[in-house]
Image: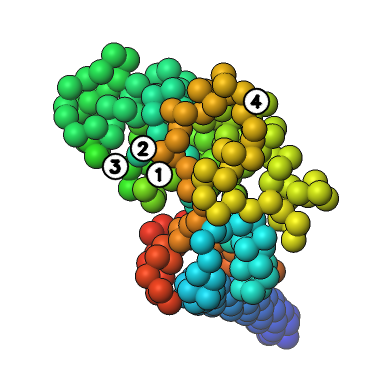
Amino acid sequence: MIHRRRGRTDGSVLVAALFLLGVLALVAASLHAIARQESRLTALRWERVQRIQLAKRLAVELGGWAAKSPGVHTTLRDLADGSAALGHGAVVTDETARINLNTADAETLERLLGPEGKAALLDWRDKDDSTGTGGAENSFYGGLPVPYRCRNGRLENVAELLLVKGVSAAAYHRAEPVVTAWGPGKINVNTVSRDTLTLLGLPENVVEKTMVLRAGPDRTMGTSDDRVWERPGDWVEALSLTTAEAAALKKYETLWGVRSSLFRLDLPRGASFGPALSLVVDCAKSGKTDLLSWREED
C-alpha cells in the first residue's frame, strides 16, 4: 500500500512539473513575440524619423536650388531638373500652376466645387458675417453637432475646404490636385496644366493652342525644346488669337505670370515604411526656405 501511494505521488509531481514547464514555455514564447514586436515598432519609428528628417533636408536644398535658378521664368524642364538634383524620388512641382482658392472668382469656384460649394466658400473667405445666397456663415457652422467658426478670412491650407458647407470628400479630392491656398494668385503659363486652364474657363481652342505651342517641335512637355514665355504678353501674342478669342481672354490678363518661387515637394513612401510626405515651400528669400505646409500619408 505504501509503495502504490508513492507511485501516485511521483506521477502527480511529474504532471505538475510538465505543466509548469509548459506554462514557462508559453510565457517565454509570448515574451519573445513581444520583444520582436517592440523591436519592429522601434525600427519603424526610427525609419519614420529618418524620412521626416530627409524631407526637411530636401526642403532646404530646394531653397538652394531655387537661388541658383534666378532666371526670369520657371518651366517644366526647370522643375524636372530640380527633382533630379534632389534625388530620393522627390518630385518638385510649381504651386503657382494651381488655382488659388483665396483669389479665384465665383465662376472658377463653381466649376471646381459646384454651386453650393462656391457660395459657401465665398462666405468662408470674406471678412463679414453676412450670409450670401446659398452660402453659410457662423449661424450655420455654430449649429452643427460639432460646432466650429467660419474662417471669415483666407484659407490657411487646402484641406480646410473639407470644413466648408457643400464641399464633399469627393469634390475635395477632385479639386485638390489643381488648387492651392498659398501665393498671390498668379498662374505660371509656363507650367500650368491643361486641366487648370480648362477649369479657369478658357476656351478649348486657346487651351489646345497653349499646350501645342509650349510642347515645342517634339510635342512633349518638359523637354529641352519646350517653348518658354518670358512675359505673359509673349504667350498671348504667340496664340495669334481672333478678336473674339482675345476678348474672352482679356478678363484674365492680370492672372498670369511666368516665374515661381513657390513649390510643392512630394516625397514617396519609404521602402519598408516611412510616410509619403507633401510639403509646400516658399523660396522667395534667396537661399532660404519657408515651410508653408506639411502633410503626411502613412
Q: Is residue 20 visible?
A: no
* SS state under label 2: loop
**Mark 1 and mark 3: Cα distance apart in space:** 12 Å
Position of the N terminus, as image quadrant, is bottom right
Quarter of the view holding residue 275: bottom right
**x%, y% of residue 67?**
48, 74
Q: Image quadrant of residue 202?
A: top right
Q: Which mark, by number, is residue 154?
A: 3
Q: Is residue 40 above or below residue 232?
A: below
Label located before the other in sequence (1 or 4): 1
Is the C terminus in the top left, top right, bottom left or bottom right quadrant?
Answer: bottom right
Kind of residue at disc 2: Thr
Which residue is denoted by mark 1 in the rendering?
185
Q: How many marks?
A: 4
Camera-nearest residue between 12 and 134? 134
Looking at the rendered structure, which numbered label has been put on residue 103? Answer: 2
Q: CA distance from mark 3 to mark 4?
A: 31 Å
